[in-house]
Image (cartoon, rainbow, N blue to C red):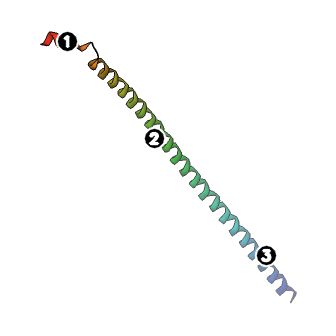
Amino acid sequence: MYRQRIFQYSNFLLLISFLIAGSLLFQLRNLYNNHQRHLRIQGYTKDVMQLTEDMNVIRRVANTSMGLLRKLEQYVNNDHTHKYKRKLS
């Protein structure tokens, strides 16, 4: 009877230790998955920031191009062109 109780108690301790080990493994798996998700989000954030920088470069180039086109248009529509028109006609 005494051996039977010790056996039941050791089985109970073994079961508890398996439950603790399982819960630790579950927590480790969750930590790993969260870390992987965090790394993916960091990668996405870097990609979005790179796209934002590229869009800002494109916007600056477009603004510069439009400014140069406006200056060229002003130059063509300005009084400077009458000299060339007289020479051509």
Q: Amino acid at mark 1?
A: Tyr
Q: CA distance from mark 3 to mark 1?
A: 102 Å
Q: Residue at x 47, y 36 (%)?
A: 53
- Of residues 17 and 69, which is closer to you in this image? 69
Which residue appears at 61% of the width and 54% of the height?
35
In terms of depth relative to the viewer, which is nearer, 44 or 26?
Answer: 44
**Farthest residue in the left direction?**
89
Q: Residue at label 3?
A: 13
Mark pair 3, 2: CA separation:
56 Å
Q: Nearer the viewer, mark 1 or mark 2?
A: 1
Q: Is residue 3 left or right of residue 30?
A: right
Mark closest to the chain's N terminus, 1 or 2? 2
Label 1, residues with CA under 10 Å away: few <14, some 14-19, many ≥20: few
Q: Position of residue 39 (x, y in %)?
A: 56, 50
Is 71 left, or right, of 50 in this rendering? Answer: left
Q: Which mark is residue 51?
A: 2
How many marks are shown on the rendered structure? 3
Position of 23 relative to 45 (above/below) = below
The quarter holding residue 57 reads top left
Residue 1 higher or lower than 43, as above or below: below
Which badge, 3 or 2, comes first in the chain's sequence? 3
State whether residue 82 is above or below residue 12.
Answer: above
Comparing 71 with 60, the one in front is: 71
What residue is shown at x 29% (from left), y 16% (from top)? 78
Please tell me which of labels 3 and 1 falls first in the chain.
3
Residue identifier under label 1: 84
Q: Is residue 38 left or right of residue 4?
A: left
